Image (cartoon, rainbow, N blue to C red):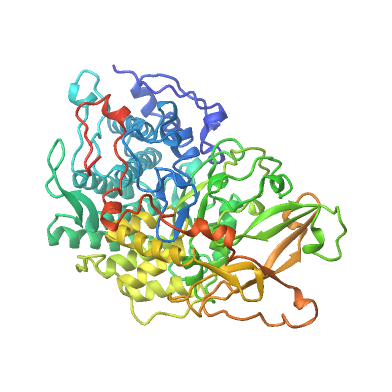
Amino acid sequence: MKKINILILFAASVLATGCKGGFFSTESPSAMDEASVFSSSRQTEQVIAGIYTIFGEQNSYRSRLCGQWVSFNTDIEWQNDLASYNNYAMTKDGHSDITAKDKHPWVYYTSAIERANLCINGIQQYGDTSDVDIRYLWGEALTLRAFLYYEMTKLWGDVPYNFEPLDVNTTEAIYVTKCDRNKIYDKLRVDLVKAIELMPYADEITWGPAHNTVERMNKQFACGLLARIDLAYAGMALRPDTWIEGGGASYKVQPNTIDATLRSELLGEAVKYTEMVMNHDGVEIGGKLKANYEDVFRAICGNVTEYGKTETLWEIPFANNVRGQFLNRMGAYVNKTALGKVLHTTATSKSNLKVVLTPDFVLSFDKNDTRKWVTVNPYEWVYDSENTTKVDPELAYGDTIVYQKPTKANKFYLGKYRFEWLNYDVTGDDDGLNMPVMRYSDILLMYAEAMIGGVTGDAPSYTGSKSALDVLNIVRRRAGLAEKAQCELADIQEERAKEFAGEHIRKYDLMRWGILGSSLVEAEAKLEAFGKVKKDPEDASKFIIDLAGTEYDGRVNDKVYVKLQKDNSAVNKGFGYVITDIYGLALDELGTPEGFDEPDHNGWRIADVWVSKNSATLKGKRIFANGLDANAIDNRQYWPIFEIILASNPRLWNDYGY
């Protein structure tokens, strides 16, 4: 009888992911008889833990796939470190941040998929598939594999088809060739429908460690993942004009070459399965869709993992303060000297956040949109003991303060994940904050998009009970916005930008809508506008953005104003001050704020956001390198298969001019 080649040595917490979910509460088997392992739900779970463990590897989701290396830059999110991995200039050699020490995402994805293959095959051969717990674990393994495979197609487009355990005696199994991703999508759809049949809803899972938690797979996430794949399958993509083994000579962004019947079926499937989630979790605000947008992210940072108490459907689980750098990479910026003073951290290194939001995007929010100042952090936490009176005249020289200092226009940071919202201490780079993969609002907006026929406008084969407009307006009402009178693709595109900024979604939305390149070119032109400067008419020693002749002329204030308030809840040493009000960072928010003419300006302070010395960083090809046009960007939507992989497998090749 064959032996399992997975050595489950990850009870040691250094590589443990999912510790909060109790993966490692049982004794781990080592290499054992397959029949013995997969006849036991307890031991089968340990094999599944081997899949989750790979998420914690360095160049996997621990610190690369969770950060700025993959999903940025877009028209709303950009990265002020222009490395090749995010400026559409990646080469076959890869980049040291991704391929250091020959460890890279391709290896981790394929290793995790092989572990899933072993697990699925073992359950099917030896498990009691009438047992409710084994059925759940089978569905979990299928959904994990589908997630991993879909992630690979997002990064590389067409990848090898390998859904059986490796047979080392077969050359074709060792040297697997690429296939048309449609074949993979078809397999993932079948697998996910099966997983949805096998797995209960989160609150109905009987397998104790997975009951009602967002750290494990559930029916709701499988439904949402199926809808994501359906919309990608039915949408636009960079594809060879003719799929040929060894590589096609020509390629472009184009609709998938499938017939109208299949496209209608895909859209109908997305409607059907998102509606299934909506019917179980409730559609209206206050249920799974939380009433307060800020509370969504406070719950993530607060380690809330009970399914009914958070808006996420699934999060990649990491062990608190042990493994995983999601907050370190994606969290609001904290200056090195302030980090050890901010609540819940004694670390001395600065946060490694590099993802910022474009000025145009910041200004585009409606004034009433409650998502704006949750999404955008136009400040950083800093430590000061020399200029304290600038923050509060009542302070004395030498008083220790930690405060939120307004930043320049090239550093409008992402604010959804914040150190001050944690409920546990961080002592190093590995904060262990879970990475949210899908939220309930995505279920609603995917439903609406599928209902209107997606990017091609084809009618879905299945019609849901709610209109696309009704569901779109539910998301808008939660944001404090007036309801729309129509629901067209442009309305959904705008809503998804505001709802999911910084959540690793926007780039792939733009890709399946076929507008990645054109959106980046347009965004670059807007950044150029914010890179122009002129002397401040009130103070010749200062400079402000020169927007004359642009769509922003007369609509953007020359100055930005903020109010600070003493608040020690976010610091563990000295005095803390937080920004409570911002004026001048919205279109048509002009002049001075109300009360500025009163004594002491009623607490308002001028923040020099539009200044010369920093405006240069907004100039010239900051989103992508070398002045690429839309077509050139679109031809670099995917990473190349790295040379180290090509050298080890002669049956692989690169398309798209790499």
Q: From the viewer's perspective, tell me whether residue 138 is left or right of residue 11.
A: left
Q: Position of residue 636 (x, y in %)?
A: 29, 48
Is 209 above or below relative to 35?
Answer: below
Q: Farthest residue in the front direction?
A: 540
Q: From the viewer's perspective, tell me whether residue 424 is left or right of residue 467.
A: right
Query: Visible in this render: residue 126?
Result: no
Give the camera-side residue of 628 and 333. 628
Give the camera-side residue of 354 and 167. 354
**Residue in the image at 36% along x and 21% along y:** 5
Give the camera-side residue of 360 and 149. 360
Picture quarter containing residue 457? bottom left
**Residue in the image at 54% along x and 58% along y:** 410
Q: Position of residue 537 (x, y in %)?
A: 62, 76
**Residue in the image at 74% along x and 57% along y:** 569
Q: Position of residue 140 (x, y in %)?
A: 38, 42
Q: From the image, which quarter does the C terminus lie in? A: top left
